[in-house]
Amino acid sequence: MLYFSKFKSLTVIIVSFLGIIFAFPNLLSSEKIDSLPSIFPSKQINLGLDLRGGSHLLIEVDASVIALERIDNIYNDLRLELRKENISLAEIDQRNDQIVLSLSNLSSAEKLRDILEDLSQDIVGINPSVQNNQELDVVEVTQNSYVIKLTEAAIDSLTRRSVDQSIEIVRRRIDELGTKEPSIQRQGKSRIIIQVPGLDNPQRLKELLGTTAKMTFHLMDPLADVDDIPRSSMLLYSRDNNQTPYIVMRRSMIGGDNLVDAQPGFDSQTNRPVVNFRFDGQGARKFGKITTDNVGKPFAIVLDNEVISSPIINEPILGGSGMISGSFTVQEANDLAILLRAGALPAPLIILEERTVGPDLGADSIKAGKIAALLGLLFVLLYMFISYGRFGIYSNISLAINLSLIIAILSLLQATLTLPGIAGIILTIGMAVDANVLIFERIREELNNKKSPINAIDNGYKRALTTILDANITTFIAAIILFQLGSGPIKGFSITLAIGIITSVFTAFTVTRFMVARWIRKSNPKEISI
């Protein structure tokens, strides 16, 4: 156990040295790190919201909008299918979240049910626990009239899908702001908790999240009148302060789903901020055909039911790219590009709670955490030195290396450190010392049994190894379970605990044994005291 080959010795030295080097940037300010040569490590641990300050939002996905859109799509598809099957109707109308339908001929009832069954989506794959897997609930009011609406299972399914999609889009939008390690988690059925450490402008975050960013392109309806708008058209207003009314065709030419890129820029003629966009292949072909067929006609670029631009199609746009102009500021153009790149939210987000954590609280927490860690470390070092002498010094050195390795790994992983994470680090310091105490007590027992120094040390490490591994493996399993089942601070604690267990076993058993072996080999003492 005390023999170290050159390869093992070199490995212990290199790992310990790298731990110190990669942990060192955390002692420097950002300015000093920027002035260092590029070859020097520069990654630091990201501080969480409780340490660094930032913005905390609790938002809710307005799933009722999704249900209304789904009913609207079913309504339009149903009208087309009924027309194809030549089924005559006495009435068909959409009333909020339901469709009211009356047949002129009772013999068409079976065909109607077949059409509704084809239009209905299967929701078993999304919610397998639901017995009724039908999306539509068809209620026969009288012999030839029906009310069609979504089932509760279908609404729950739409809500879950909307929240999942919203989480990914919110994450992309926040990442575009350049913030590090945002925490975005589901809460309950339709709510999302967002924590963004270090965000200087929480109002900008609210504006980004409060915009659905559903962009569509519509042709104008020049024949319609504001007082008499046909069902095929709709009345929208401009986004600027003038609130100019526009009558546009209800059916969009192309949607924002085909956008692959959007970048802020400046108009070469007016030098005003604009947003340059680009479609994918399918979108470029569709946009090229539409603009070719409608040269000379105006069209509207609509964002969240507001007209942001209304240019004239002067010539076919065949390259798949275009420009959105308007009365934008530079930041508004940049934010619009961010929204379009991230994609449209499936439903509006309602901000239920907002908290801004100031940096003073974070600074106080960091200071208190440092004091607690330093005091705990100091008392542990003194205890180990007083109790075990030379062996205590070796233990203290390995403890410092252990702390460096934990910080280095967290820095390389760009993990987020929170107060529970600091608690996990302090806990691993205690566990590392506990392993050394166990080893040294075993060595004392061997010395009391009149064993030679080399045999006593060798047997002490051998006998303690099994106990150390058992204790740390069970704690490591607990850390994995906490990471899988926990969220937020619990995960931060489990990560630092798991990393600390690995480094503690390495330093307590390998690093101290390496130093003891070097000393025994060099001095070859006849007696040792511990």
Image (cartoon, grey):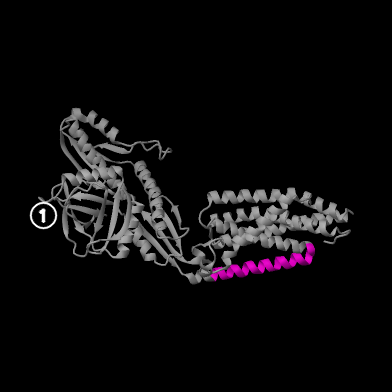
Please report the residue visible at 76 percent of the width from the left and 66 percent of the height from the top.
385
133 or 45, nearer to the observer: 45
- Residue linked to disc 1: 227
Whether residue 330 is visible:
yes
Q: Residue at x 76, y 63 (%)?
A: 392
Q: Nearer the viewer, residue 345 or 503?
A: 503
Q: Answer left or right for 460 relative to 110.
A: right
**Residue 333, percent across and down?**
30, 61
Q: Quadrant of the C terminus?
A: bottom right
Q: Is residue 424 visible?
A: no
Which residue is pictured at 66% across the width and 69% down the height? Answer: 375
In this rendering, the answer to whether 63 lies above or below 392 is above
Q: Position of residue 82 (x, y in %)?
A: 20, 34
Q: Is residue 29 above or below residue 120?
A: below
Q: Looking at the rendering, which quadrant does residue 328 occupy?
A: bottom left
- Write the residue at 51% across / 56% down: 488
Q: Start and end of the magenta stretch?
A: 364-390
Circle 1 crowding by C-alpha within 10 Å: few under 14, some 14–19, many from 20: few
User: Chief secondary structure of the magenta span?
Assistant: helix
| Magenta residue check for 370 | yes
In the image, residue 204 lies in the stretch drawn in magenta: no
Q: Secondary structure at mark 1?
A: loop
Picture quarter containing residue 334?
bottom left
Query: Viewed as shown, does residue 117 lie left or right of 480?
Result: left
**Amino acid at the residue labelled 1:** Asp
Q: Quadrant of residue 443?
A: bottom right
Q: Tell me residue 50's x, y (percent).
A: 50, 64
Residue 347 image point, x, y percent: 32, 51
- Residue nearest the viewer, comparing 368 with 91: 368
